[in-house]
Image (cartoon, rainbow, N blue to C red):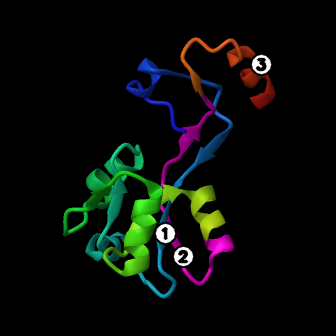
Amino acid sequence: MTPTAGREKSLDFSTPYLAAPPGVVVKPGTRARDLYDLRRLRWAVLETSTLRDVVEDRVRPLEDPQVVGSRGDALALIDRGDVDAMLLDLPVGLALNRSAPDRYAVIAQLPGAEGLAVALPQGSSNAQAVDSAVR
């Protein structure tokens, strides 16, 4: 999970273990050569994801993205053809592509990378052990 100030109010985080750029997940056959083409796609965004800001502020699609509560909801919209794309951390998007290549493809990687970290209950006695294992 990406640590944010809001999330740190209720969770503790380990040292980041991976820097992951955003990847554009679509149905196979969907094409976009550049940011202009990405703007023309219909997007789903997760309500609480840090990648929502990337779609809304950097991609700036022509149509307002559909806001959903979970990754599964967004993938269902792609499956039904209700939207064309969503952003996921690139390793997650590539894993989806590998596990279901007939359903999902990653067609682009956007610049920038978020640090992913282990989320722990606030005040967890395991924080030091998890940090040590991550390092």
Which numbered disc covers residue 25?
1
Image coordinates for residue 109, horizontal then vertical, percent: 51, 63
Q: Give the range drawn in magenta.
A: 97-119
Please, what is the three-letter code of the amino acid marked with disc 1? Val
Give the crowd class for mark 3: few <14, some 14-19, many >=20 residues within 10 Å: few
What residue is pinned by disc 2?
Answer: 104
Q: Does the magenta portion include 15?
A: no
Seen at 42% across and 53% down, the residue is: 70
Tell whether label 3 touches label 1 (CB within 8 Å): no
Query: Where is 65 relative to 8, above or below?
Result: below
Return the residue found at the far left: 63
Tell whether label 2 touches label 1 (CB within 8 Å): yes
Which numbered disc covers residue 129?
3
- Between disc 1 and disc 3, the foreground one is 3
Inter-mark Cα distance, 1 to 3: 34 Å
Quadrant of the rendered image containing residue 101: bottom right
Count of all numbered marks drawn on residues in the image? 3
Q: Can residue 60 be seen in this view?
A: yes
Seen at 63% across and 76% down, the residue is: 100
Q: Is residue 33 visible?
A: no
2 or 3: tag closer to the N-terminus: 2
Image coordinates for residue 89, horizontal then vertical, percent: 54, 54
Which numbered disc covers residue 73?
none
Query: Where is 33 relative to 65, above or below?
Result: below
Please, what is the three-letter code of the amino acid marked with disc 3? Ala
Give the crowd class for mark 2: few <14, some 14-19, many >=20 residues within 10 Å: many
